[in-house]
Amino acid sequence: MTPSATQTPDSPPNVSPLLEMQDIGISFGGVAALRGANLSVAAGEVHALIGQNGAGKSTMIKILTGAYRRGSGSVRFEGREVDFRTPKLAREAGISTIYQEINLVPFRSVAENIFLGREPRRFGLIDWRAVQQRAAVLLESFGLQIDVKKPVASYSTAIQQMVALARAVSADARMVIMDESTSSLDEREVELLFTVVRKLRDDGRAVIFVSHRLDELYALCDRVTVMRDGQTVAQSTMAAMDKLQLVTTMLGRTLAAVVQDDTSAREANLARRGKQALAAINLSAPPKVSDVSLQVHAGEAVGLAGLLGSGRTETMRLMFGADPLEQGSLSLNGETVTLKSPQDAIARGLAYLTEDRKAEGIVPELSVRDNLTLVCLRTLTRNGIVDVKKQQAIVDRFIASLGIKLRSADQPIRELSGGNQQKVLLARWLAAEPSLLLLDEPTRGIDVGAKADVAKIVRELRDAGLGVLLSASELEELTAVADRAVVIRDGRTVAELNGADMSETAIMDAIAYGNEGHSQLADAAQAANAAHIEDALEGDRHGA
């Protein structure tokens, strides 16, 4: 299910662009990051900027917003040539950026965040009543009625995104750049945010929308610019480019040989799975986890499905010893265990790739080499000295086997694209030789090509005998990898699906109805289900 696409207007009239970036070039350490890249955006449109991680999208945005200085090319904004030397100058010119990690002051009020640094004054003092009144009126114009006196951290991520948009509007931004703003939102929150974005467009503002979620692009955007390998390879209206064209243009290749989802193959995997690697029985740690039970065998991938807030992440944290288990039992390889810490879990052969690679995964300032070998470093150390040859051998092996793209293993991991950072984190855990791999949203915030690569890696690990528990909010991705699906709702296990019974529609049915029998949703969807799944698979074969 995706946000409605019916509200997307035709492409804007042929007018002079608000923004025009031509022949942009920049290099880092002798390596060209952009080569003759172009971007043209009109006022009153939502413009998608897409490409694989490392294609040059972020670099293009950083040049526009003054974070980087371009090496060649020209930038025109509102009809005049500009060269923003700092982000502050770009903001003052009317360009506002909203990143995936929202740049708000969490413990200040909504109203304070909207007008921070630009508060109305009276007799030389901040007029707090005016601040609150103007903030409330502005948010009400978005259709949002909330208490603007409350700390912004007390509201959901979706509301915080809208507060950030309100701040941009209050600063009279002519252009708003949204970089992966929906990656942590559920469907209802996405549609709420889209309503606000459409209003910005209708008010004559330009919005540059960066997302890896293709369905969102078609639901929201008017035109699209596709980047690949530091170059602009296509510019088009969304209506003129279907999903298959969009993805193959972005990748420069098809994914038919990369992404597979076949019921008979899934059933064959179940038939040859090995011994039980994990058994969780009645796990409970209120209020997020109430009663979760599931099993994972060696050589199988089990999907953990459920809405945001259903308890998926909290369940994985319990299994990894990151949070205390209040009730229930956990068995690993047939032995009941008590995991008091992640260190206990690692010693028992568990590995856990968290959903937030930036906050809980990478160490930004450390090199790729040090990040990759962080977990297994103890085994490489003798008398306090790291065996550099062994360390390098491990690094080289995983860079090659996982296809990690980088200049050097010595470069800081923060310089890598999101997809390659994720591969490094996966390599970190594989280097520890686990028997069970817990993956929490492993493809969040990475491009479709990297998603396909991660899915392929997970299938190969499963086929090599590793047990995998995979949590994902994108059901297409989950069904493309998992042999079985365990569905949880409100912190409880409500269904288990496998083989021919496991489909996106069946999972959504279970999320809605649990084990209450064959629902009206299932009845209504049955006739169209085969065609729906085939369409989804065809899209993923070429576009996941």
Image: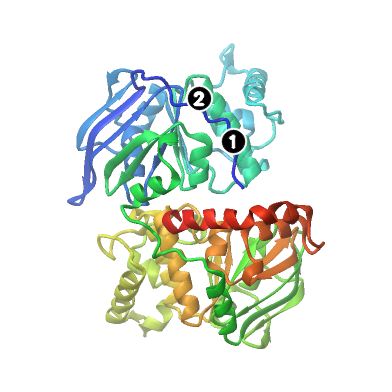
Tell me the amino acid under the disc marked 2: Arg
In this view, 19 is above or below 62? above
Task: Name the residue tied to disc 2.
Answer: 201
- Figure quadrant of residue 495: bottom right
Q: Which mark is residue 193?
A: 1
Secondary structure state at the residue bearing disc 2: helix
Tell me the amino acid under the disc marked 1: Leu
Tell which circle, 1 or 2, labels the residue nearer the N-terminal end: 1
Callout 1 crowding tier (Cα within 10 Å): few <14, some 14–19, many ≥20: many
Q: Is residue 80 left or right of residue 497?
A: left
Residue 301 position in % (x across, y down): 56, 73
Cα separation between marks 1 and 2: 13 Å
In this view, the residue in front, 534 or 243, is: 534
Q: Which mark is residue 352?
A: none
In this view, 481 is above or below 78? below
Scheme by which the image is coloured: rainbow
Residue lying furthest front in this view? 527
Q: Is residue 92 left or right of residue 201?
A: left
Residue 295 position in % (x across, y down): 66, 77
Residue 174 position in % (x across, y down): 44, 22
Q: Is residue 98 left or right of residue 55?
A: right
Callout 2 crowding tier (Cα within 10 Å): few <14, some 14–19, many ≥20: some
Residue drawn 48% across and 40% down?
217
